[in-house]
Structure formats: structure tokens, C-alpha cells
Image: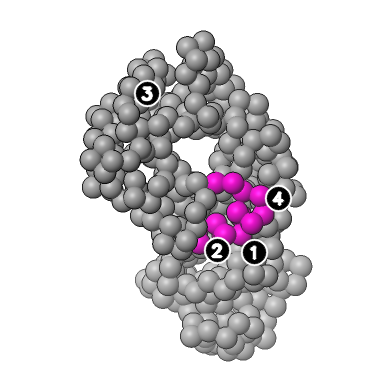
Amino acid sequence: MVELNRWAWIEVDLAAIRHNTALLARRAGRAQLWATVKANGYGHGAIEVARTALESGAQGLCVALADEAHQLRMAEIAAPVLVVSEQPPVAFEQMLGDNVVATLYNEATIAEYAKTAARLKTVGAVHLKVDTGMHRVGAPVESAMSRVEQISSLSSLKLEGVYTHFAAADLPQHAETANQTRRFAEFIAELDRRSMRPKHVHISNSAATLRDLTGQTDIVRVGVALYGISPSVEMQAHATELRPALAWRARVSHVQRLAAGEGVSYGLRHRLEREATVATLPLGYADGVPRRLWKSGGEVLIAGRRCPIAGVVTMDQMMVDCGDLDVKIGDDVVLLGEQLGQTISANDIATKLDTIGYEIVCAISSRVPRVYLNQ
């Protein structure tokens, strides 16, 4: 077992990251693979994942925030980094100093970014994001050409790419993916007619890459699949070759035998139906275990057996109904991962909570130590 100051920790298998990166790079074909390491590498550790992915076939990185890009640069990671949404003007000087690629799409933001770059006597690399149907961020298709012309007219900016983002590629039966692909292809065709096509054109995310929807792209922006997690339950058949990289482990910190009818945890909302051994684990919702997981059939693995969470998950601790299992303080527990042939995946937990695997791993708190295997 791992010896740490806490009896709760994350294990990240970098061999799995290497395997997934190489697999996805092959699936990308002629396109470059850019690894998405935002949100601290989906809870896995941005620096460690970025280095491993770049050593294994990735050619660039994607983040959500200017500060995430800065963290990579402070770690002396020199690969191209795309910040995938507009940032506040206060971040522009840092982004330009870090030589990262800005995503822009609003007329005023483009003008302000160009002004900052001109003041610093530099040229800022830019990718224009086009909204082809997700309606989160991006220039509407109808005005995207105007934004291309605006960026191209500014000497302090260089348009290096245009891209869009799928809203439903992880739902294989959804018709909107084909509609977005068509709208984007029409926009790129218009750029070609005007001889304004930039170096990079990209559309594919993890789900699209796993489904081989990589025709109109020369970069695949791969996130959740890099970590061995299927983009959705519906995509599981497409993700069988991926290897989950993260295991969430703990040790039993307290054991008690309680009589039938006894209540457990705040509010005593959970009452034991029979006499049982209840084990306490030293982690809770402050560590990222959803407080409501007890009501949704949440389980952990102890000695290869599935044991249900008993009562409300508290801030720093949670209780587990072990029945008649012989449990001792210090015994190994798995919240997410494999133990003695039994497995709990991020999507297993997500399904119980009517959410997605992304949320489960991204929610794991930074106070949970990360241990890196196969470095």
C-alpha cells in the first residue's frame, strides 16, 4: 500500500495515458492530436499528463483558462497550447508573454487582444471559434467570415486556425452532429474560395475521434478519452480499447458493529435493516465524493465485495455498510477502479447520479494526494 499522510489518495497510471495517447493518435490518422489537460488534467494532474501525452504522440495541448496555460509554461512545457475560450482582458498580456494560442470570437475582444499585442510589439496567434450549433461560445456561422476578415486585417494578430465544437457527438444517434459537420464544411469551403483558409481547421473531440469522424479536421482535441473514460454510456462500445488511468483509493479508519435499526450519519436518515459492520473512510464531499451518493446506490469495494455507502456523505468522512464482512482498520478500499476482479468506473458512478464521468473525476479535490505510477 502507498504510505502517505492521508489514508485517501488517487493513483494515476501514466502507462494508461501513454497507451490511450498512442491509440488515439492512430485513430486521428493524418490529424495532429492535441491533448486537453484543463481542470487539472480532468483531475489526473495537468503537468504529469501533459508531459506523458507529448512523449506519446500528442503535438499540442488544450486548456480552458489563461492560468492553466501559464502553469504549463512555468513547468517548462513548450508545446503549442490552445486556450479554448475567450479570457478577460486582464489576462491578455500574460497569454501573449506565454506565447499561447488565443481563442477569439467577439469583435470587441479581437480588437482588444490586437491592441495588447501591438503594445507589446508582438504578434498573437489566434484560432477563431465558430458556433455551428452548440450555442455556448463562438462566432455565429453567419458572422464568422467577418471575424476572419477582422483578424486578418490586424497586423498584431495571426489567424492560425478555425474550429468548432460538437454538441452531441457522444450520442451516436443524434442528427445534429451531421448538421454541424455540414455547416462547418460549408464555412471552410467559403474560406477556400476566398483563399483565406488558415493552417489549422479542426472539429473533432474525443467522441468524434473514437467514431472516426475526423474528415474535416487536421487537429483532434482529445480530452476524456485520453484518461480512459468513455465520453458517454452510449459510446462504451467505441471505447473498449481505452485504459482507465485513475484509481481512487482509501483505507478504513474506523470500524464498529451496529444493531439493526441504528441510524448512521447526519440526520440518521439511513437506518440499518440488520446488524452490520460499518466502516468509516477518511474522505468526504470536500474531497469530491458527492454528498448524495448514498441515496443513489453508491458503493465501494472492500476485499473485492461491493459495499453500499451508509448514510449521508459528510465533509471529511463517509460510512459503508460491510454486512458481516471481516473488516479491520487499515484495510484497502476502492472508490473508483479495480479490486480483486471487481470494478467501479467513473461512468458507473455517474450513471447513479444522472451525470457524466467527466464530472466525477474533475470533482476530485486537490487535497487528495496524487500518486503517479509507471512514470
Q: Are marks 1 and 3 in contact (CB under 8 Å)?
A: no
- The stretch in magenta equals 46-61
Q: Going from the N terminus, do you reach mark 3 or mark 4 first?
A: 4
Vertical relation: 301 (above or below) 109:
below
Q: Residue type at mark 2?
A: Glu
Q: Is residue 37 shown left or right of residue 265?
A: right
Q: Which residue is mark 4?
A: 22
Q: CA distance from mark 2 to mark 3?
A: 36 Å
Q: Residue type at mark 3?
A: Ser
Q: CA distance from mark 2 to mark 4?
A: 16 Å
The residue at the point 43 percent across, 57 percent down is 73
Q: Which residue is mark 1?
A: 14
By secondary structure, the bulk of the magenta-drawn segment is best described as helix
Q: Which mark, residue 152?
A: 3
Q: Residues within 10 Å of mark 2 (few under 14, many from 20)?
A: some
Q: Are marks 1 and 2 in contact (CB under 8 Å)?
A: yes
